[in-house]
Image (cartoon, rainbow, N blue to C red):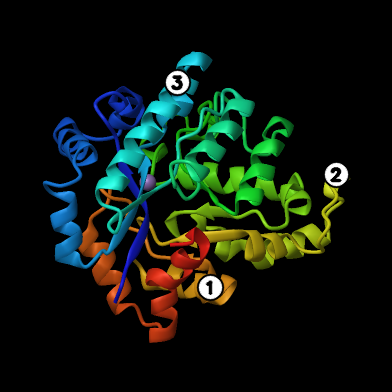
Amino acid sequence: MRKIALEEHFTTEAMKHYSLPGAAMFDPEQWETSLKRLLDFTDVRLPQMDQYGIDMEVLSLISPGIQSEKDTATAVRNATLSNDSLAEIVAKHPTRFSGFAALPLQAPQAAVAELERAVSQLGLRGAMINGHTHGEYLDADKYLPLWERAEDLGVPLYLHPANSFDTWHNLRGHEELIGPMWSWGVETATHALRIVFSGVFDRFPKATLVLGHMGESLPGMLWRLDSRWAFSSHRGVKLGKERPSDYIRENIMITTSGVCAPAPLLGSLLALGADRIMFSTDYPMEGNAEAVDFIDHAPISETDRAKICHLNAERLLGL
Ligand code: MN
């Protein structure tokens, strides 16, 4: 079955210094291999895609990317460079690669302009946002124009995990919990809920946020979110729709990146429906073999499998 994968990472020689914060979580040998895979497109990546039957990878600069840059002018310049490099790779292999832009969120107006350029001129399909930008989240007022432009362009923003701005008190003394195993999921789900509860989707009802890692646990929380929201004082927060889950079902899509287990997939199918879930690997941090074997053999209907493997991505990204 045709497969399009949406959370597949790369870097370039010019951008690889931005991936160092992630390197600390790997043993050095593992990181060495990952970095080689991130820099590679044709030696291992394409042959693996052929071997495992992945027709297309939507590529994105590995987290935290440009957002970790401290100098704003450099961030703006490097986002352009990175997106130009990505567009070149896509142009060489247009049936195998597509791409999500990196944005210099340090400069919100420049980020809007770069999204516009990346989509309209470079043919990229949206943007990959790696968590907070120096402590600022996508619900900040200064990012409303970015949501507006994404909605206008009809492209999604994919919210990818990154380290939190500071170390939460309850993680201290348990550094093993920091990273993709645990803290990134909580961090990213919280970021997504900030966007929901700030009313971004009331203002931009056609905007789409994509979450990886089977929705960063949110699909399992819909009933509880609705139930406790209904009984809470709301602390002055108003939403246009009655239930928080209305936004998660209508404005959020999820991918299977890095989660190869039937239980959360079936739970997400029940919670969100088959139209909201898309296949992904999270290459090279996760393996294609396991991701493909998982989705090929998951206990779901062939109709749903086709939606998850390629139809939803084709619709969302206009592929
Ligand atoms: Mn990833």
Three-letter code, disc 2 = Arg
View extreme (front): residue: 121
Residue 183 in view: no
- Residue on which disc 2 sits: 235
Mark 2 vs 3: CB contact within 8 A: no
Identify the residue shown where x is 73% and y is 57%.
205
C-alpha gap between disc 2 and disc 3 = 41 Å
Residue linked to disc 3? 77
Q: Looking at this view, is 67 or 84 the one in front? A: 84
Q: CA distance from mark 1 to mark 3?
A: 37 Å
Q: Which residue is mark 1?
A: 275
Q: Which mark is residue 26?
A: none
Q: Earlier in the sequence, mark 1 or mark 3?
A: 3
Camera-near label (2 vs 3) is: 3
Task: Give the amino acid at mark 3.
Answer: Arg
Determine whether the residue tagged by mark 3 lies in a helix, strand or loop: helix
Q: Is residue 94 above or below residue 19?
A: below
Give the number of the mark in front: 1 or 3: 3
- How far across and down, in percent of the image, does residue 305 sit? 39, 78
Q: Can you tell which quarter of the image residue 84 is in?
A: top left
**Residue pictured at 82% horizontal, 62% vertical:** 230
Query: Residue 145 is drawn in which quadrant?
Result: top right
Category of crowding for the residue at label 2, using alpha-carbon neighbours closer than 10 angstroms: few (below 14), some (14–19), many (at least 20): few
- Mark 2 or mark 1, which is nearer the start of the sequence? 2
Residue 238 horizontal side relative to residue 23, left or right: right
The percent coordinates of residue 150 (x first, y second) are 61, 46
